[in-house]
Image: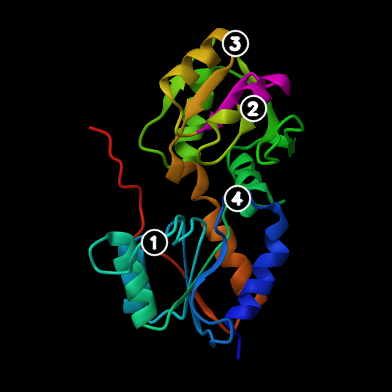
Amino acid sequence: MVTVQDIIDLMESISPTVLKQDWDNIGLNCGKRSSGVKKVLVALDPFEHVCKEAADWGADLLLTHHPLIFRPLPMVTDDAAITRGLMILVQNGISHFCAHTNLDSAAGGVNDVLAETLGLASISPVAENHWNMLRCGEVPERSLTDFLETVKEKLHAPGLRYCDAGKPVRKVAVGGGACSGGLFDALCAGCDTFVTSDIKYNEFWDAYEQGLNIIDAGHFYTENPVVPILAAKISSAFPELEVKISESHADCMKYY
């Protein structure tokens, strides 16, 4: 019988704990390491509707990128969505495990997958980036408009926010999720374009004034490509398990 600990051991080989940021809360957020596992639901986030999907499907383990418990919880009641989700998991005997900033930094993790999805070649870490998260790579020279089409299509994004610094696209930095703080690291690495998300107003201006094309493709869309990769790795390591990608989880932000 495969146990929760067996899955944890696999995830540690994929995204070692040592790579996590100090503020992060990764690993087993609830459940028992000794519990048997037959069904694993994989999603980007452990929101209430995903926890309910896990319970309805009969999952034994919910595996996500983002933590279920990110900050200390003052109480566990049904007054808030996060604790309602936690209660669903506990009441149904479902364990939850997450790999967050360690998966962002890991080889073959969030940002390597993002770079590969966008068709970058010669992918490598951005050496100047102190988080060890950003990746950079090269594309055949093209216009920013053409590259925007690629980003939107490959990530299935409903829309993009961007700043055109007047340069063709040749060397691209990527940072899935909220990595806009790496803007100057991307510049120092000689990149002309940076794909990330959650970019602030002043950061768009910083990019524009420094001559860096910058593309905000959305937090969900820049990180979600890693989900099927995780599901495939679990299935490969444990072929006896049923592994499913969440069917209910999608970005709640819409474009009017």
Task: Identify the residue at image location x=67%, y=39%.
Answer: 131
Q: Label 2: how many residues lie within 10 Å, few (<14), some (14-19) or many (20+)?
A: many
**Distance (Cα) linking label 4 and label 3:** 28 Å
Q: Amino acid at mark 2?
A: Val
* Residue 73: numbered disc: 1
**Distance (Cα) linking label 3 and label 2:** 15 Å
Q: Quadrant of the C terminus?
A: top left
**Distance (Cα) linking label 2 and label 1:** 39 Å
Q: Which residue is mark 4?
A: 101
The quarter of the picture where residue 138 lies is top right
Whichever of callouts 2 and 1 sits on the residue coming sooner in the sequence is 1
Q: Amino acid at mark 1?
A: Leu
Q: Which residue is mark 2?
A: 172
Tag 2's secondary structure?
strand
Q: Label 3: how many residues lie within 10 Å, few (<14), some (14-19) or many (20+)?
A: some
Which residues, given as a range, are shown in magenta?
183-196
Q: Label 1: how many residues lie within 10 Å, few (<14), some (14-19) or many (20+)?
A: few
* Residue 210: numbered disc: 3
